[in-house]
C-alpha cells in the first residue's frame, strides 16, 4: 500500500525539512497575518513547479495533477503562531519576534506538507489522481479553515486529511481514531444589568456582582446534573468583568466562557440551558440578562474508512508499534470545516520526548517538538495521499 519511493524521498530531504521548520519557527506570524509565511510557501512551490494560488488575506491552495486519472485528495497544514513569549531562549531557531511564538507546532505542519508536496511531485507521473494542498491561516481563531473553504479549497475534493503534531504523545507514535476526536468549540457572553449604587447602601441597588456570582455557581449544574455522564461536555467560564471600585455596587457584569462537546444535541441543550439559567438568575434579583452564543468550530469526527487507512499506512510505513490510541480531546480544531465538505480524518503525530524536553503542553512558552517526528509527519501526509488514490 505504501510507496517505497516516497519513503526514500522523504528520508533524502529530512535535513531540508528540519531547516524549513526552523526557519518558520524563528519567524512566527499571528493568525491572519501570515504574509511572509504565505510568500515563502508560494515561492517554494513555484521553485518546484507546482501550480498554486494565494488566498485572501493569507494562505495558499496548490494542486498536483497525477499522470493517471483518479480522485482528488486534499492535505491540509495550518501556518499561524500564537501571542506567546518563547521561553526556549537557547535554541538556534528561537523566535525572533518578541511575544510571538509557534507554540502549537503549526510551523512543523507547514514544513512537513511542503516536503510531502516535493516528494509527491517527483512521483506525480505514477499518481492515480490529484493531490490538493491547503496551507491555511488562522487555525487559532477557529475561522481559518472556513475561509479557505469559502475560497474553493474543497471544490472537487473527495477526501481530506490533516495532521497535528502532539507533544502529549510519545515521539513517532501516530494516532487516528474513528469517530469523535476534537470537540466542538462554542463561545458565549452573558451580560447582566442591575442597578449600581453606594457600597454602604445595598438596599436601593441590584448588585450585578451577586447576580453574576450566582450564575457562575448555578450553571455548574448544567453539566453535572443535566447531561448523560457518558456524553463528554465542558462549560468553562474563563472571564468575569464586574464592577469599578471597592465601594461602588456594580451595575453591570459580563461573563465569557466556552462550551465543548462532541454531539449536536448536547450542544443545543447547553446553549438552551445557559439562556434559562441567565434569565432565571437575573429574575431572582430583579436584574436583566442577555446571552450571546457563538458556534465557532464543529467537532472533528473522523470517518471510519479514512481513519483505518491512516492506521494501515502508519503500520506499514513505520511498524505496527507506531499505531497509538490517543483518546479524544476537548480541545477544538477548525479542520471540522473541511470534513463538512468531504469525508476524511485528522491524525496526531507524537513529538513528546522527556530526553529532549519536548513534553510541554501546546500553547506553553516552552513548547517544542522532537524533530524526529518531522519525517514521520511528512511521510504520513504523502503516503496517505498515495494510498488513498491507489486503493
Ligand atoms: Ni494547533
Image (cartoon, rainbow, N blue to C red):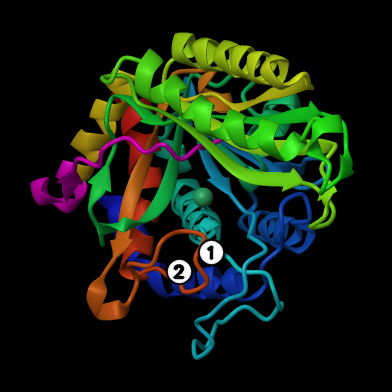
Counting from the top left corner in percent of width and height, residue 283 is at 71, 14
- Mark 1 crowdedness (10 Å alpha carbons): few <14, some 14-19, many ≥20: many
Q: Is residue 108 above or below residue 14?
A: above
Q: Quadrant of the N terminus?
A: top left
Label 2: state its secondary structure: loop
Report the front residue among 92 and 282.
282
Q: Is residue 300 left or right of residue 101?
A: left
Counting from the top left corner in percent of width and height, residue 303 is at 35, 20
State which tag comes first along the sequence, 2 or 1: 1
Residue at (78, 40) in percent of width and height: 55
- Image quadrant assignment for residue 346: top left
Boundaries of the magenta span: 315-335
Q: Which mark is residue 103?
A: 1
Q: Which residue is mark 2?
A: 367
Q: Is residue 373 magenta?
A: no
Q: Do callouts 2 and 1 mark residues in contact (Cβ within 8 Å)?
A: yes
Q: Is residue 342 left or right of residue 254?
A: left
Q: Is residue 319 above or below residue 99?
A: above
Q: CA distance from mark 2 to mark 1?
A: 6 Å
Report the front residue among 126 and 372.
372
Amino acid at each position: 500500500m505504501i510507496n517505497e519511493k516516497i519513503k526514500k524521498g522523504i528520508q533524502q530531504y529530512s535535513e531540508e525539512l528540519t531547516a524549513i521548520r526552523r526557519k518558520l519557527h524563528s519567524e512566527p506570524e499571528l493568525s491572519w497575518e501570515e504574509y511572509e509565511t504565505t510568500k515563502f510557501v508560494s515561492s517554494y512551490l513555484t521553485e518546484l513547479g507546482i501550480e498554486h494560488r494565494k488566498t485572501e488575506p493569507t494562505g495558499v491552495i496548490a494542486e498536483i495533477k497525477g499522470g493517471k486519472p483518479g480522485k482528488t485528495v486534499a492535505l491540509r497544514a495550518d501556518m499561524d503562531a500564537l501571542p506567546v513569549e518563547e521561553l526556549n531562549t537557547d535554541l538556534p531557531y528561537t523566535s525572533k519576534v518578541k511575544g510571538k511564538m509557534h507554540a502549537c507546532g503549526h510551523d512543523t505542519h507547514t514544513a512537513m506538507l511542503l516536503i510531502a508536496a516535493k516528494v509527491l511531485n517527483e512521483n506525480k507521473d505514477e499518481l492515480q489522481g490529484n493531490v490538493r494542498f491547503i496551507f491555511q491561516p488562522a487555525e487559532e481563531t477557529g475561522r481559518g479553515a472556513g475561509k479557505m473553504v469559502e475560497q474553493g479549497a474543497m471544490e472537487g475534493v473527495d477526501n481530506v486529511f490533516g495532521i497535528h503534531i502532539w507533544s502529549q504523545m510519545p515521539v513517532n507514535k501516530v494516532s487516528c481514531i474513528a469517530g469523535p476526536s476534537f470537540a466542538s468549540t462554542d463561545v458565549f457572553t452573558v451580560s447582566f444589568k442591575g442597578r449600581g449604587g453606594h457600597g454602604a447602601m445595598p438596599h436601593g441597588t441590584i448588585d450585578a456582582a451577586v447576580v453574576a456570582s450566582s450564575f457562575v455557581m448555578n450553571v455548574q449544574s448544567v453539566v453535572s446534573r443535566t447531561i448523560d455522564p457518558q456524553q463528554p461536555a465542558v462549560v468553562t467560564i474563563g472571564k468575569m468583568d464586574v464592577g469599578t471600585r471597592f465601594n461602588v455596587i456594580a451595575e453591570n457584569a459580563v461573563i465569557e466562557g466556552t462550551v465543548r462537546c462532541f454531539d449536536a444535541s448536547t450542544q443545543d441543550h447547553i446553549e438552551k440551558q445557559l439562556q434559562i439559567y441567565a434569565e432565571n438568575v437575573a429574575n431572582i434579583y430583579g436584574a436583566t440578562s442577555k446571552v450571546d452564543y457563538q458556534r465557532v468550530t464543529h467537532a472533528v469526527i473522523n470517518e471510519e474508512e479514512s481513519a483505518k487507512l491512516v492506521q494501515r499506512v502508519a503500520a506499514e510505513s513505520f511498524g505496527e508499534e507506531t499505531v497509538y490510541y490517543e483518546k479524544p480531546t476537548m480541545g477544538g480544531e477548525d479542520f471540522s470545516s473541511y470534513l463538512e465538505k468531504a469525508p476524511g480524518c485528522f491524525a496526531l503525530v507524537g513529538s513528546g520526548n522527556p530526553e529532549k524536553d519536548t513534553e510541554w503542553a501546546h500553547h506553553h512558552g516552552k513548547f517544542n517538538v522532537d524533530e524526529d517526528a518531522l519525517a514521520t509527519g511528512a511521510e504520513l501526509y504523502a503516503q496517505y495521499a498515495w494510498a488513498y488514490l491507489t486503493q
